Amino acid sequence: MERTHYCGKLRKTHVGQKVCLFGWVWHWRDHGGVIFIDLRDRTGGAQLVFNPEKNAELHRRSHDLRSEYVIAIEGTVAARTPETVNPTLPTGEIEVIVEKLDLLNKAETPPFPIEDFIDVGEEVRLQYRYIDLRRPEMLKRIKIRHQAYQIVRNFLGGEDFLEVETPMLAKSTPEGARDYLVPSRVHRHHFYALPQSPQLFKQLLMVAGLDRYFQIVKCFRDEDLRADRQPEFTQIDIEMSFPTTNIFFDIMERMLAALWKEIKGYDVPLPLKRLPYSEAMERFGCDRPDTRFGLELCHVSDIVVDSEFGVFKDIVAKGGMISGLNLKGCARYSRKEIDDLAKFAGEFGARGMAWMKVTEKGLESNIVKYFPEGVQARLREKMEAEPGDLLVFIADTERRIVYDVLSRIRLHIAAREKLIPKDQWDFLWVVDFPLFDKDENGRPTPSHHPFTSPVVEDLPLLESDPFKVRSQAYDMILNGYEIGGGSVRIHDPAVQSRVFRAIGIGDEEAKDRFGFLLEAFKYGAPPHGGIAFGFDRIAMLLTDTANIRDVIAFPKTQRATSLMDGSPSTVKEEQLRELHVKLR
């Protein structure tokens, strides 16, 4: 037999045609002697009919078929009778009267049903991933990922970007996470690194004059994992010479708009909002804010310093911060619920959570007695408090803790109170990041990577006040997820040397680590910049799942293991000897 059609593509227009279908037995039903079997392939299912009055032998053989047997059939497409039409199925108006059957392979009973919304642990699904991928919802996600891949490739090709492959085996360079190292058999005691990103190579492509580059590429980072992170991941890597921010942002915005229009039917309003990093932190407590709802931070250090509450006064005196949230309508929370919220805050570093309920009589809590009437009135006014609201406060000498805890409380309450609208997509750029963060010793360390260009106006501060220098970096945020990040790069060797010195990298170390890039910059490097979008995360959002493993065909667990093939695994001693590697 030779396949003529896919199961899920048969329609009423095929009635009367002879067809040959291949696939897996899905559902088996006996309706008063007539056997109905749903045959499934990657496109969906079609109903097969085995009628004893038309072919007794085929009818007898159909009794031997079981779930997930692989079969081929020939038959004639027929219209279902009106009372048996299933309007919920694309193939619900037709059925196939089977005239020939070939059993291609038997199957053991699967460890879980090939159905959507199954109640089975993720570990079992990952162990039998090849079975999990048969389920319609998983197939749909893989198809959407494929569709997104094609949309991006076609769009960027249409914008004159060239797709260029960069090496998988390269020199280990410091890029913010641990490298996966590959020992060389030929060059004893030497190692390649799997790329954390093609960062240096795409900059070299700009030096080479390719002008516009892209690649949908595998990258590798040996870092702590979480639900939306994998040790090997895919990114849309893009670089462009002679960019202006407006031109570059316009292209990236139109690419994302094309994705959401073609896959979700959603018109992304362009141009996208741009939010300075400092404003994102002040309003939302994080640099990837979910802006689909309000519940913004309110900074009250200037007010509570006039109270008699010693904890707050002491923190203000030490240069710390007191900020809060107005949880609208949440004064109904019981004391236990408030205590649970305080425990939640403590999980992320808060040393306590103060609170006040807003009633018709005023503010109520065990600390209100320390706040004079005038201070209470100023708090209510600034926090726009009304009866029925719950005010919560976090105080700390470290601003990052205040920001982080309140950001998490904000998201926690938004989910609990159902404040997040469904089917809404809030894209925005976060811009003007600081060029440097502080390391554990208070010294400058790159906020992104050491090739990010400072804002030109801030260059005089590089040596005198480096933490005030802004970078020409930008992140693309969607509904609280960072889906992309990039920057304008340094192309002037003198500026690059100044940045290296600011982070403690001298000329010799820079030459050792990045010599090939610095050497290239001597031969006419154009101004250039780019971005890397997290393709897995984009696919995750396009398919309405919160788990990045759902859109990767063969993902790793949160411990970076594969339950299906057992990797990572030990290797034979002779393999190690060839690589000049000895285990201790």
Image (spheres, grey):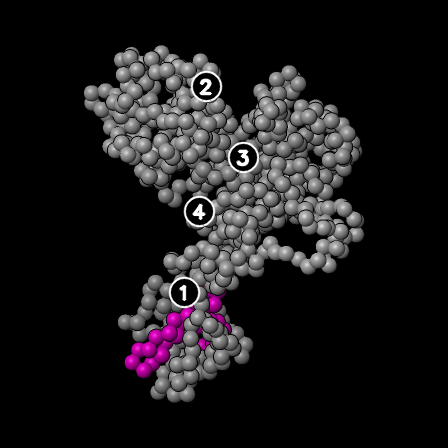
**N-terminal of the two: label 4 or label 1?**
1
| Residue segment shown in magenta | 16-45
- Who is closer to the viewer here, 214 or 567? 567
- Is residue 382 in view? yes
Q: Is mark 3 on a helix, strand or loop?
A: strand
Residue bearing mark 1: 113
Asked if the residue under mark 1 is in contact with the one under mark 3, i.e. CB atoms within 8 Å, the reply is: no
Mark 2 or 1, nearer chain start: 1
Horizontal placement of 328 versus 455: left or right?
Answer: left
Q: Callout 2: 10 Å neighbours few (<14), some, many (20+)?
A: some
Q: How crowded is mark 4: few (under 14 residues within 10 Å), some or many (20 or more)?
A: few
The label on residue 475 is 3
Nearer to us of marks 3 and 4 is 4
Amino acid type of the residue tagged 1 in the rendering: Pro
Give whichever of 249, 487 is nearer the camera: 487
For the point 54% across and 59% down, the residue is 564
Residue 320 numbered mark, or none = 2
Between the residue at mark 3 and the residue at mark 1, the CA separation in whole angstroms equals: 41 Å
Residue at the spot x=34%, y=63% of the render? 88
- In the image, taking residue 350 as reference, residue 86 lies left or right, namely left
